[in-house]
Amino acid sequence: MKPSSKTTRRRFLAAGSSFTVGLTAGVQAQSAAPATGSAPPAPNKEVHGPVPVINPVPGAAFLHAGPLVGHVTDTSASLWAKGSNSGRLDFKVGRESDLSDARLVSGGDLVEDSFFTGQAVVDGLEAVTRYYYTPLLDGEPALPRPYPSFMTAPATGQNTPLRVAFGSCAGQRGYLAAAAFGEMAARRNFDMLLMLGDNHYGDTTDPALLRDHYHMHRTVEGFTSLIREIPTYAIWDDHDFGPNNSDGTTAGKEDSLRVFRQWWANPAYGEPENPGCYFRFSRPGVDFFMLDVRYHRTPNKTPEEGSKTMLGARQLEWLKSELAASTSPFKVIASGSEWQTLTQPDCWSSFARERQEIFDWITGQGIEGVVLLSGDRHFTAGYQVQERHLEFTSGPLGSGNATLMENPERFTGADEGKLWAVLELDPTVTPARFHYEIWQAGGGLLERRELSYDEVSGRRRIAPSPMPLLPERMEKKEGR
């Protein structure tokens, strides 16, 4: 098949792929015709198999998932692992790659109630130093050499450039995000990873089903390789909290939070008197505010009478107080739901009063360098909300793609393939320097662009991207 002068490379490849798939489907149909009276499957429609049920494996415990590097500071690191059965979890940690200088850090007993997951906090580390480690199960190393490693953060006041990758929407099955995570692991060109929700699609609060979904995604090879060395932080959105578009009225949300805490190694989970998955952490020059937009959320369709909320009163006050106290050049606020105005009902657009209260607080307090992050929408885009507030939404890592629509707040975007984004934050110069990058599995770097600190802080309008990401704008896709 030869492309005509009016056929783009993408259309040509898509046409060729359709021919191949159609031919294969025809052969399969001849060799395995459906039973009489049953409808044939839709052409080119992938049917996913069941989610594997994960049960304890008899015998001595072995490494069933992980390990994962969670919250890392200049003096500590949180490590996570899951065993196949009950046993004792510890970690050996040292500077030498063969762990000849390692010390033992207790992780505790792996028990059925926590699905044989365990964590340990390693203290007494030195800043900007590489440490090697391995989990121990019942005193035996659970990994062969070469052992994984992680780098501690710079000390307070020692500002360095920071590269932050983020994404959402991992897909209905673990293999759907394999291309994205495989490339991210191979490139490893960032310092930390933020998982912004829909990290699995359990659509339930049943602990056993949640654990099956967590295990399925946690054992994807690329993701496994990545989280063993890159500090990883997570919040949730609807599909890994409960059913689609779920909120604070969801029955069993306490179970969802309990299982979430078992599978991630974040620095905190809400506050003592206010449960949730929200927390704050910092790197020199950058403060991160990770929000919980589900546990305390009012249903989307509730009329606005002055009390409708996405965060709940306590979390909202926490955010405002923490933002006001921040002196870092960059303040990154991460939410599972999108902030921009022309979106769909399961986003901040349904909570316009509370969103405006946050925006008014930022402007009224003179808070600069705020970057809003979000997920959920199955595309990647950059917005200047209300011509002032900078937002990036990123995904899908594994889910199907949604189509970008015309939007005056948006200045860039991509909606083909498996996508993630990287922010490069440099607080070592004045004014602080900011770059964003859009990455695609198999397509590499689609766009890298610098925004001035005035643009980040809303003092200057952001012009549309000067580099089109595809030969034709994505809003006009053939066949959609």
Image (cartoon, grey):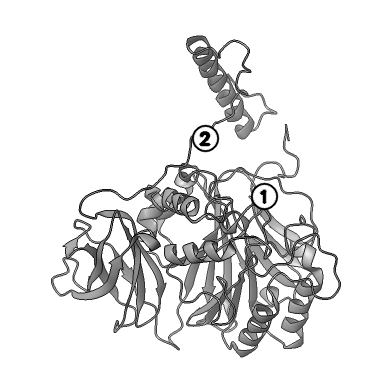
What residue sits 19% from the left and 63% below the top? Answer: 138
Residue that carries the numbered disc 2 in the rendered image: 48
Quadrant including the N terminus? top right
Where residue 131 sits: x, y (%)? 27, 72
Front residue of 385 and 110: 110
Occupied quadrant, residue 53: top left
Looking at the picture, which amino acid does disc 1 mark?
Pro
- Residue 179 vs 129, above or below: the answer is above
Front residue of 165 and 259: 259
Quadrant including the C terminus? top right
**For this view, does 115 lie left or right of residue 350?**
left
- Inspect this view and state whether residue 153 appears: yes
Residue that carries the numbered disc 1 in the rendered image: 468
Q: Which label belongs to residue 313?
A: none
- Residue 118 vs 181, above or below: the answer is below
Where residue 452 sits: x, y (%)? 65, 73
Which element type, helix, strand or loop, lies under badge 2?
A: loop
Which element type, helix, strand or loop, lies under badge 1?
A: loop
Looking at the picture, which amino acid does disc 2 mark?
His
What residue sits 78% from the left and 67% below the top? Answer: 351
Where residue 329 sits: x, y (%)? 58, 83
**Which residue sits furthest left?**
100
Q: Earlier in the sequence, mark 1 or mark 2?
A: 2
Where residue 11 sits: x, y (%)? 64, 30
